[in-house]
Image (spheres, rainbow, N blue to C red):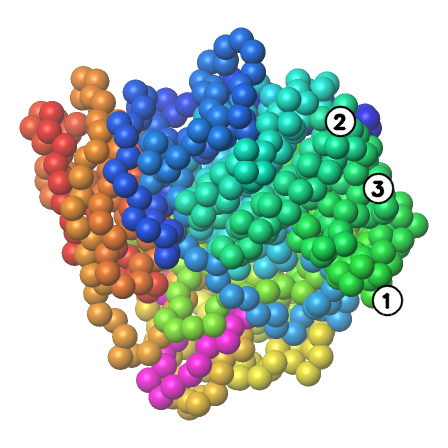
């Protein structure tokens, strides 16, 4: 993608990818960061890891294919050969392995008639941090790209890489766990950089090398890494020029070997439009005779999708779709590149060439660097970020059912049908976005430290926010001032001149005589009446209103206190819930502020406490005066687990949240001794789908 030569793209990208050398590690004394996961379902147990590195902090993994650069790496950078990687020799494996399986998705009837199912899809190429020293487990700050609009994304690429650090990147576990919870595949990145960025053709030759038996060892290693870490395949981006037709043929055979090894494990390949069958780099902006053999050759499928370079034109996209048709492939397996790195929703995009209104979509599309929604902000607070991110994905109206027809930005919600994974009971959502200024448990502050960890994110409503009212539209936001659990809650605020119905989750939930819906909510201003909506059928057509059945909920009393309201759904037994909503009616003339902290649907027969984890162990620790950094691990609890939380017990018996993870290993960068205590008691609890916590497993850190 560096070969574009367009003003601003190369310097901007170079700045990001070179930032790894100067990346700042979590400082001593910073708040503890939540952790990543271990133990992918179905994978054999990993053998004991070797001794942890001296600084203990785990980072996302990156490699060169085989040979390393000349000279010495910069500060904080570790040069590694993928050819020599083994799971047994990976000290950070437990911290980088995802635990959440890829959830199946369904497509509800879209809220707007132009949002189409079964046509264009969206890929997203995101740099979540620098290549080197990108923490495995989130970080001690709320300033993070906490992506939540998974409903519109098919495939996410963990973007990055540089010649000075490493050119093969494996995504870290929080990203994969959050994506999988929402049915989105995540790909690692193989980036063979242009010579202008230090690219060396020997790394391309290393990638496609064959052993004496004709096998491709790096292809096999890429499959081992994806299988061990729990992600879904690779984005292959060969931009180092200078090759020949023999190298082009080797690259195609390498992709075939990668596909053959990965297909039994469900792994996918996306090929970027750079290297041609000539072995030279020449960005086509199209699928054509020069690159089609990396997508489909005479023997069949080579890559699952192709990312079409930014040089596309309306004609080349139309021709590309026609060629895909002739090859027997879906034209929506082509991603037309849309550059949002520098200008976000102000980017000039010829939308009618991709997703024309009033006729079939031409191809799919891929966002390059949508984290602009965070990076362009002066105020990088969580609230400011989500307001910007909602506008990017939903559009200027901030309502997917009522897009602004004058908005030049054709937001995904206006063109692409949303998807959901909420299809089984029990289900619960505390509207936690995966970062926050504090951590809350049952409405109380359990830690004052800011945090980010995408793996702790809930399955949030996909349509943000579809509001139906005959009066003034209230503001609906994910708010960080208070929460029931995690770092955020849903806030509806403003004057209500008529009842306002707020659409929440699209679902496929089976209802029985014992099914109940429960809200945890608070009224902070203005008296309100609250109803819950359950749709037992879908709209007749896109853009038609969701036919909710409205059930009265207990009206919360005055004051800011959280209150539980349970609504029985026995009258709907035997039917399926296709959607959930709330309707708020103001009972006075003043503006209202109503907060939803938790929504759950379950059978009353459920509710047993989850099983406990076991064998909580301090694997490694580094103490300095009254502070310590340490790695913890434990044995997975039996039965389904949403996440694990780790706390410390203070001398007065109170508990303080230290971090959370979906897996069974956690790094704590700063555990502080309380007074002159001789040992700090640490606890880990399993948390189920309804946020019920198990009895703790305990260990101590002695001072």
Q: Nearer the viewer, residue 563 or 46?
A: 46
559 is higher (above) or lower (below) than 155: below
Circle 3 crowding by C-alpha within 10 Å: few under 14, some 14–19, many from 20: some
Mark earlier in primary sequence (3, 1): 3
Question: What residue sits right under mark 1 in the picture?
Answer: 359
Question: How much space separates mark 2 and mark 1, taking CA atoms?
Answer: 41 Å
* Residue at figure coordinates x 59%, y 59% from the top left: 151
Q: Residues within 10 Å of mark 2 (few under 14, many from 20)?
A: some
Tell me the magenta residue range: 504-524
In-front residue for pair 522/654: 654
Quarter occupied by the C terminus: top left
Residue with the mark numbered 3: 290
Disc 3/disc 2 C-alpha distance (Å): 14 Å
Q: How far across and down, in percent of the image, does residue 46 sit?
A: 31, 44
**Disc 1 crowd, CA 10 A, few/some/many (<14, 14-19, 20+):** few
Location of the N terminus (image quadrant): top right
Q: Is residue 511 magenta?
A: yes
Mark earlier in primary sequence (3, 2): 2
Q: Which residue is mark 2?
A: 243
The residue positioned 20% from the left and 61% from the top of the image is 611
Q: Position of residue 166 (x, y in %)?
A: 54, 25
Residue at the extreme left = 678
Number of numbered discs visible in the structure rendering: 3
Q: Position of residue 421 (x, y in %)?
A: 51, 66
Left/right of residue 551 with respect to residue 448 in the rendered view: right
Q: Is residue 428 magenta?
A: no
Horizontal side of 19 relative to 397 (left or right) equals left
- Evaluate whether residue 194 shows in this view: yes
Q: Quadrant of residue 609?
A: bottom left
Question: As drawn, is 353 to the left or to the right of 604?
Answer: right
**Which of the labelled discs sits on residue 268, or is there none?**
none
């Amino acid at each position: 993608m560096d070969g574009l030569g367009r003003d601003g793209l190369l310097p901007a990208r170079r700045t990001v990818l070179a930032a790894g050398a100067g990346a700042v590690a979590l400082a001593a004394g910073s708040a503890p960061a939540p952790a990543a996961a271990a133990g992918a379902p179905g994978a054999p147990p990993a053998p004991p890891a070797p001794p942890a590195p001296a600084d203990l902090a785990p980072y996302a993994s990156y490699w060169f294919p085989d040979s390393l650069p000349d000279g010495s790496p910069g500060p904080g950078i570790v040069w590694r050969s993928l050819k020599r990687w083994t799971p047994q020799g990976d000290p950070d494996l437990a911290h980088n392995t995802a635990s959440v399986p890829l959830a199946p998705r369904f497509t509800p009837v879209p809220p707007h008639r132009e949002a189409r199912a079964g046509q264009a899809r969206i890929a997203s190429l995101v740099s979540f941090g620098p290549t080197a020293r990108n923490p495995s487990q989130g970080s001690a700050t709320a300033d993070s790209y906490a992506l939540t609009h998974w409903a519109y994304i098919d495939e996410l690429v963990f973007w990055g890489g540089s010649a000075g650090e490493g050119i093969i990147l494996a995504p870290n576990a929080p990203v994969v766990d959050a994506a999988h919870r929402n049915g989105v595949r995540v790909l690692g990145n193989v980036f063979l950089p242009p010579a202008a960025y230090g690219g060396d053709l020997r790394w391309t030759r290393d990638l496609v090398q064959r052993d004496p038996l004709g096998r491709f060892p790096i292809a096999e290693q890429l499959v081992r890494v994806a299988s061990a870490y729990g992600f879904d395949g690779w984005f292959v981006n060969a931009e180092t020029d200078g090759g020949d037709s023999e190298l082009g043929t080797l690259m195609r055979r390498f992709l075939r070997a990668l596909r053959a090894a990965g297909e039994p494990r469900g792994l996918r390949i996306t090929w970027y439009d750079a290297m041609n069958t000539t072995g030279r780099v020449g960005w086509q902006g199209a699928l054509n005779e020069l690159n089609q053999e990396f997508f489909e050759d005479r023997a069949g499928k080579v890559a699952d999708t192709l990312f079409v370079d930014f040089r596309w034109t309306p004609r080349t996209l139309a021709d590309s779709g026609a060629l895909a048709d002739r090859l027997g492939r879906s034209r929506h397996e082509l991603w037309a590149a849309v550059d949002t790195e520098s200008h976000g929703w102000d980017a000039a995009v010829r939308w009618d060439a991709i997703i024309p209104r009033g006729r079939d979509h031409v191809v799919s599309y891929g966002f390059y660097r949508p984290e602009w929604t965070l990076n362009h902000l002066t105020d990088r607070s969580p609230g400011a970020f989500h307001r910007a991110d909602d506008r990017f994905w939903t559009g200027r109206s901030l309502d997917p059912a009522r897009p602004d027809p004058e908005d030049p930005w054709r937001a995904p919600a206006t063109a692409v049908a949303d998807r959901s994974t909420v299809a089984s009971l029990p289900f619960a959502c505390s509207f936690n976005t995966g970062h926050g200024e504090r951590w809350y448990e049952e409405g109380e502050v359990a830690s004052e430290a800011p945090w980010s960890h995408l793996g702790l994110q809930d399955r949030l409503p996909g349509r943000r926010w579809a509001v139906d009212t005959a009066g003034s539209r209230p503001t609906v936001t994910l708010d960080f001032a208070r929460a029931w659990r995690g770092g955020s809650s849903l806030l509806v605020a403003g004057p209500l001149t008529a009842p306002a119905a707020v659409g929440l989750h699209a679902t496929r939930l089976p209802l029985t005589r014992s099914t109940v819906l429960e809200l945890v909510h608070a009224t902070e201003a203005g008296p309100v009446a609250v109803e819950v909506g359950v749709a037992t059928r879908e709209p007749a057509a896109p853009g038609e209103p969701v036919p909710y059945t409205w059930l009265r909920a207990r009206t919360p009393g005055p004051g800011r206190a959280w209150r539980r309201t349970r609504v029985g759904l026995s009258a709907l037994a035997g039917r399926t819930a296709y959607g959930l909503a709330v309707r708020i009616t103001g009972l006075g003339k003043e503006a209202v502020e109503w907060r939803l902290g938790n929504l759950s649907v379950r059978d009353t027969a459920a509710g047993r406490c989850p099983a406990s984890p076991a064998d909580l162990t301090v694997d490694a620790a580094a103490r300095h005066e009254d502070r310590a950094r340490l790695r913890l691990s434990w044995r997975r609890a039996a039965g389904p687990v949403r996440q694990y939380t780790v706390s410390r017990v203070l001398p007065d018996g109170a508990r303080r949240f230290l971090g959370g993870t979906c897996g069974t290993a956690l790094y704590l960068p700063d555990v502080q001794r309380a007074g002159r205590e001789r040992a700090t008691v640490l606890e880990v609890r399993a948390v189920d789908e309804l946020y019920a916590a198990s009895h703790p497993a305990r260990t101590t850190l002695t001072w």
